[in-house]
Image (cartoon, coloured by chain):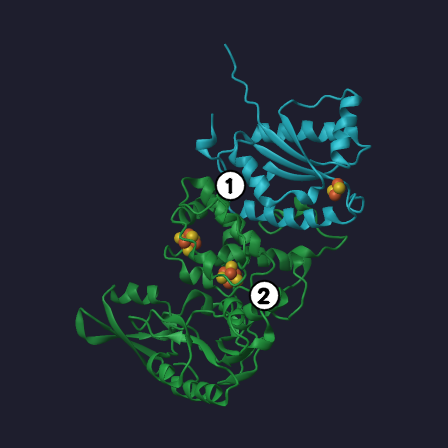
Chain colours: A cyan, B green
């Protein structure tokens, strides 16, 4: 019997200075993480506007990650502190509207944490796979 | 009944015009029916006598009008503000949206505004006139000669039932005296939704938001929505003016609208008042306010001019997003 295995689509916004470099390091060290994760590089985690997150869902993402430098280590000194407030409120609102809270997440990953990057991605893909397809924030017209 | 009469307000406004302190007044003008009062700029005593109204249907908050009105001339404009309106007034000052020097703020005491939808639920749609009669409203309809007597407290609008303050946060002079900051129950409704299961919450909001026709009234009336360029007007944004085609678009609009005013929304309740579809938009705004209070400390937008909005501020010990979610909903 053929099993039609569900593979989620994950969008990861990674800041240029830490998490994106962390992803590079994971690659250099040949650490595996699923190909379902699509990375979008942003100058800083605070570049991520809440509409970006929603738009990713609209276009078919099943999970969205926002990755940035550890608080205190932002290349622009304070960018990620704003990210933290903004996303805390956004996530809380999504949950208030009945959207699964596990689908969206913020992770702080430094340029030296290639292993953490790979582990985070593996774990997140597993979480989203268990949740199944994003149905509550999908736009059917955007489906191929 | 309101504490101060129409007559007293008009007299004072006429004095202000006569003294030359101000050359126009932003106030409520009678509409076709008693209940559809509209904002208007009055320029003469005669006009005030003829069309000015003050009563239980003067819900409109004029703060936002000051942006355009103050830009029109160097003369001062007098504006009538209920206590809740003064918070928006301050918030706009904080954001440098108009010149305080060009405004003469007249605070009017407010006894709560009636909700015409609640009245129509009792009487039906054919209302011909409404008279204020002490604590009652006499509603005349086309169905009967005798009026339907309604207790005003039974048809108070939602936002007035959970009014946060009868104290004016800003004024140059007060008519009808000042009140107190109230111990309001305005987050109870939010807490009720938080206590639902995820499925129930989803179904609840699905039911509410799917009625939205994207008329943009909630956005246009909002004193916190004053950007000159708005994402919802941008045809390249993919979320421009159009009625939502599906669940996603409804949510997109409502999440983004509420998010853009998060930390700046004074909870004046205008959005819910003007929504023709009776969508409880204040429950989205209040969720943000409640969370902000819980995560970053009590904050009331518009209470103090110049205060720093929570989303343009931070603390090194702020809660992490993953701990924030679900902290509120048990
Ligand atoms: S006022 Fe009501 S119907 Fe109109 S856009 Fe806002 S929520 Fe939708
Ligand atoms: S969002 Fe609604 S309650 Fe908040 S300031 Fe705007 S109109 Fe008032
Ligand atoms: S540069 Fe990495 S979070 Fe700001």
> Looking at the image, which is closer to me, B231 or B70?
B70
Of the image marks 1 and 2, the number of the one nearer the N terminus: 2
Residue pictured at 57% horizontal, 53% vertical: B260
Q: How far across and how far down the image is residue A120, in percent?
A: 71, 31
Crowd band around label 2 with a 10 angstrom C-alpha radius: few (<14), some (14–19), many (20+): some
Are discs 1 and 2 located on one and the same chain? yes
Q: Is residue B180 above or below residue B293?
A: below
Q: Is residue B39 above or below residue B317?
A: below
Crowd band around label 1 with a 10 angstrom C-alpha radius: few (<14), some (14–19), many (20+): few
Looking at the rendered structure, which numbered label has been put on residue B236?
A: 1
Q: How far across and how far down the image is residue B58, in percent?
A: 40, 73
Tell me the SS state at disc 1.
Answer: loop
Q: Residue furthest top?
A: A1
Mark 2 sits on what residue?
B97
Residue pictured at 37% horizontal, 54% vertical: B277
Distance of label 1 from label 2 (alpha carbons): 27 Å
Q: Residue furthest front?
A: B73
């Amino acid at each position: 019997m053929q099993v039609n295995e569900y593979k989620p689509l994950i969008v990861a916004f990674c800041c240029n200075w830490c998490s994106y470099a962390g992803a590079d390091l994971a690659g250099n060290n040949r650490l595996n993480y699923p190909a379902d994760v699509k990375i979008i590089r942003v100058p800083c985690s605070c570049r991520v506007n809440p509409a970006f997150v929603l738009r990713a869902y609209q276009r078919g993402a099943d999970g969205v990650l926002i990755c940035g430098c550890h608080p205190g280590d932002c290349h622009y000194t304070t960018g990620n502190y704003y990210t933290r407030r903004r996303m805390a409120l956004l996530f809380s609102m999504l949950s208030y509207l009945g959207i699964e809270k596990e689908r969206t997440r913020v992770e702080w990953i430094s340029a030296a944490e290639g292993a953490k990057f790979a582990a985070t991605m593996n774990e997140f893909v597993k979480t989203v796979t268990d949740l199944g397809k994003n149905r509550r924030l999908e736009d059917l017209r955007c489906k191929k | 009944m309101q504490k101060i009469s129409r007559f007293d307000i008009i007299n004072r406004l006429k004095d202000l015009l006569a003294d030359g302190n101000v050359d126009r007044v932003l106030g409520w003008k009678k509409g076709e029916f008693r209940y559809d009062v509209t904002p208007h700029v009055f320029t003469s005593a005669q006009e005030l006598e003829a069309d000015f109204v003050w009563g239980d249907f003067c819900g409109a908050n004029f703060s936002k009008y000051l942006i355009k009105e103050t830009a029109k001339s160097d003369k001062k404009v007098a504006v009538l503000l209920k206590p809740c309106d003064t918070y928006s007034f301050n918030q706009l000052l904080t954001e440098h949206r108009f010149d305080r020097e060009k405004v003469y703020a007249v605070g009017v005491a407010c006894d709560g505004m009636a909700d015409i939808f609640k009245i129509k639920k009792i009487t039906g749609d054919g209302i011909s006139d409404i008279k204020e009669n002490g604590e009652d409203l006499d509603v005349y309809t086309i169905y009967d000669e005798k009026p339907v007597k309604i207790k005003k407290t039974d048809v108070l609008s939602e936002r007035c039932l959970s009014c946060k303050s009868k104290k004016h946060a800003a004024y140059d002079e007060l008519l009808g005296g000042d009140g107190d900051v109230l111990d309001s129950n305005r987050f109870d409704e939010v807490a009720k939704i938080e206590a639902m299961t995820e499925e129930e919450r989803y179904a609840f909001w699905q039911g509410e938001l799917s009625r939205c026709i994207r008329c943009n009234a909630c956005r246009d009336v909002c004193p916190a929505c004053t950007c000159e360029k708005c994402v919802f007007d941008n045809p390249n944004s993919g979320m421009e003016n159009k009625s939502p085609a599906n669940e996603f678009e409804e949510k997109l609009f409502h999440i983004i609208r509420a998010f853009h005013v998060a930390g700046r929304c004074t909870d004046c309740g205008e959005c819910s008042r003007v929504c023709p579809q009776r969508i409880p938009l204040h429950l989205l705004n209040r969720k943000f306010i409640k969370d902000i209070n819980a995560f970053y400390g009590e904050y009331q937008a518009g209470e103090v001019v110049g205060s720093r909005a929570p989303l343009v501020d931070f603390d090194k010990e702020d809660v992490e997003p993953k701990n924030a979610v679900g902290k509120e909903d048990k």
